[in-house]
Amino acid sequence: YAPEGGDVPDTPETPTATTDVQILKIKKGTKEGLAGAVFKVEVDRKTIGHYVTDKNGEIKIEKVTGTLSVTEEVPPKGYVLDENNHKDVEIRNNDEPTIITFANEEQAQLEVVKLDADTGDKLEGAVIRVAYDGGNDFWDLHTNASGKASLSNLKSGTYSVKEISAPAGYLLNDTVQTVKLEAGKTYFYMYRNCGGENTASAQLVPDITDLN
């Protein structure tokens, strides 16, 4: 029906239902998309593929129905795999694509250097144990010929640092020190041992420096 002298009114558009899915990978605390994350995608417990986020941090999958399970398998380079790396979503007809978001924080790094406090010589062969939050997750680092040992791909938090084996000719100092690591930063931890083979005591001098 058209009013006299008038135009036929437009017919309102009915939104088209969709079962498309969009997976977003972002830097934690921001909206910045991250490329290179690898996700395994399952529908009703059957794997439909392994997908990699593009330069915008996006993965788009069309026409999905059922229970969608998304698991992040590999984080973007320089980022830590999140503990909550799995999500299950029931996909239904919606007006817009279903968006599933995962966030990663930048990895923290720790570098340990072992020196002779008297001479400044770099000491090879020390074994330093680094443990996360005093728990069961720990790594044993061995200082090389440059007196260095490093650990990357760490999540932020509090770590304990302890020498568990001294270099040849030096006494063990098993005093536990703590360091708080922040996402995206590298920390420098310096051990200094006094004297050599006949030394009666050892000294630990922590020197933590943000290298970024």
Image: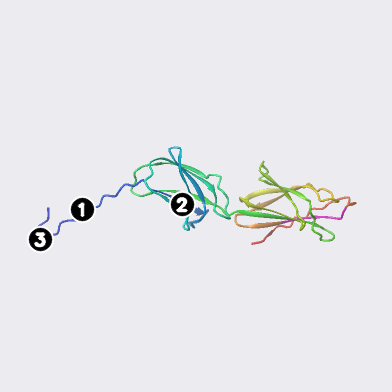
Residue found 31% across the figure and 47% down from its top: 17
Q: Amino acid at mark 3?
A: Gly
Give yes or no for residue 20 being in the magenta stretch.
no
**How many neighbours does mark 2 have within 10 angstroms: few (below 14), some (14-19), or many (20 or more)?**
many
Marks 1,3: beta carbons within 8 A: no
Confirm whether the magenta stretch covers residue 195.
Answer: yes
| Camera-nearest label, 1 or 2 | 2
Instruction: Locate residue 80, reporting x and y percent.
Output: 58, 51
Residue positioned most to the left = 4
Q: Position of residue 168 (x, y in %)?
A: 84, 50
Q: Main secondary structure of the magenta part?
A: strand
Question: Which image quadrant for residue 46?
Answer: top left
Could you tell which of marks 1 and 2 lies nearer the N-terminus? 1
What is the spatial separation of the Cα atoms under label 1 and label 3, in whole angstroms? 18 Å
For badge 2, the amino acid type reads: Leu
Q: Earlier in the sequence, mark 1 or mark 3?
A: 3
Mark 3 → mark 2, Cα distance in angstroms = 51 Å
Are the residues at dot 1 and dot 2 in contact (C-beta closer than 8 Å)? no
Q: Nearer the viewer, mark 3 or mark 2?
A: 2
Dot 2 falls on a residue whose secondary structure is: strand
Q: Which residue is mark 2?
A: 24
In this image, 77 relative to 17: left or right?
A: right
The answer to which quarter of the image holds residue 48 is top left
Asked whether the residues under the numbered discs 3 and 2 touch, taking CB atoms below 8 Å apart as contact, a structural biologist would say no
Tell me, what colour scheme is on the image?
rainbow
List x then y, in percent, for residue 160.
70, 47
Q: Is residue 181 above or below residue 136?
A: below
Q: Dot 1, how many residues are within 10 Å of its Cα: few (below 14), some (14-19), or many (20+)? A: few
In the image, taking residue 197 as reference, residue 87 lies left or right, namely left
